[in-house]
Structures are given as C-alpha cells and as structure tokens.
Image (cartoon, rainbow, N blue to C red):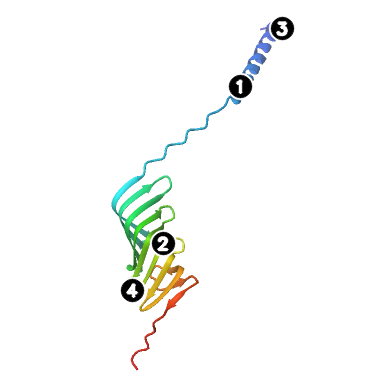
Amino acid sequence: MTVSVRLRNFFLVAAAGLAISGGAWGLFQLMQPRTAPVPLPPRPAVQLQTVEIVEFDEGRKLWELLARNVVYDRDHQLAELEDLEVRFWERGRVVSVARSPRAVLETEVRNIRMKDGVRVTSTQSTTSVEAREVEWQAGSQQLHATGDVVFRRGGSTMEGPELWADRSLMRARVGSPVRARVVVDLGAR
C-alpha cells in the first residue's frame, strides 16, 4: 500500500508535536514546587508496670532487671525505668545486686544507665559501690560509676570521681584523684 507523501509528512509532524508537548509537560511538572513528605507521627510510648527483663548470652543468664514502672519509646529504642533492681549473674549465680530509683535501658545495645543515687552490692564479699550514676556497659561487660563514687571493701573506703568494675565487684579501679581510708587487719599480737 502506498501512502502519499503529504499524509506521511502529516503523521511525522503530528508525532513530533506530541513528543514536544509531552516533553514540555514533563518539564512543567519538574518545575512545580513540591511539598515535603509528611513524616510519620511518633508512635505512642508503651507503659508497663511491674516488669522483669532477663538478658542471656549463649544460654547463660547475664542479668535480670526488675522495675516497678517502665515507659518504652519504640522510636528511640529506650526504656525509662523506675524503682529498679538489677541482679548480675556469673557462672549460674547472682554475684551483685544494683538498686536505683531511675534508669534508662538502651534496648538495641543493652546498656543500663542507673541514676539518681545508685548502690551496687556484691553477694560474694563485703564490697559495695555508691554513686550518682552507674552504667552497665554490655559491650565491655563492666560497670562504670560516676559522680561522688564511694567504693567499700571490708573496712576500707575509697572515694573518687569514677570507677570501673566487673559485675561481681571483685576487680575494680577508681579514677583519680582518690581519697582512701584503708583498714588492715594484722590479727592478734
């Protein structure tokens, strides 16, 4: 079938016109101001009462946390805890107990930051730590105490700005400057 030159030119011009108008429309759309995407509203916090959380590593219990009130912020993965007790475990037994009026649990990394007057007591010896803030650092498996730290073992006392200790409080290091009162039992003479 033969198409006349005039008809063929008409179709070519029409196709070119559609392509140009389509390109112009696309350019027009790109030039229009765009509204910013609306962020999702924050999810409401979850509030719980009388909560027990247990952390395990390869079947071994590392710690168990008991709190009277918990407010969990899912967006930031933080749990605010009130009136809590944390029991630290080692080789199947409780080696120390921490008590604090308030704390924050970072649920992603499992750090526990206890604050507003914390006391950690060893269950194996007469050792204790008192401080304004004590953080359980899950990565290093250590306690880090800051703010008016008082470390007691037997009758001896050390005071300093910070302390690092293992969960049983058997190995501890107090940051300087340190003020110490050491009691040495020499036995009966």
Circle 1 residues within 10 Å: few <14, some 14–19, many ≥20: few
| Quadrant of the frame with the N terminus | top right
Q: CA distance from mark 1 to mark 4?
A: 76 Å
Residue 40 sits in quarter: top left
Q: CA distance from mark 3 to mark 1?
A: 34 Å
User: Which residue is labeled 4 in the image?
Assistant: 124
The image position of residue 13, as x and y in percent, is 68, 11
Q: Earlier in the sequence, mark 4 or mark 2?
A: 4
Q: CA distance from mark 4 to mark 2?
A: 22 Å
Which numbered disc, 4 or 2, marks the residue closer to the eye? 2
Q: Describe the element under mark 3 as helix, strand or loop.
A: helix
Q: CA distance from mark 1 to mark 2?
A: 60 Å
User: Which residue is labeled 3 in the image?
Assistant: 5
Q: Earlier in the sequence, mark 1 or mark 2?
A: 1
Q: Earlier in the sequence, mark 3 or mark 4?
A: 3
Q: CA distance from mark 3 to mark 4?
A: 103 Å
Assess whether mark 2 and mark 4 are in contact (beta carbons under 8 angstroms). no
| Quadrant of the frame with the C terminus | bottom left
User: Which residue is labeled 1 in the image?
Assistant: 28
The image position of residue 19, as x and y in percent, is 64, 18
Name the residue nearer the viewer: 63 or 70.
70
- Above or below residue 69? Residue 149 is below
Q: Earlier in the sequence, mark 3 or mark 1?
A: 3
User: Which residue is labeled 2 in the image?
Assistant: 133
Q: CA distance from mark 2 to mark 3?
A: 90 Å
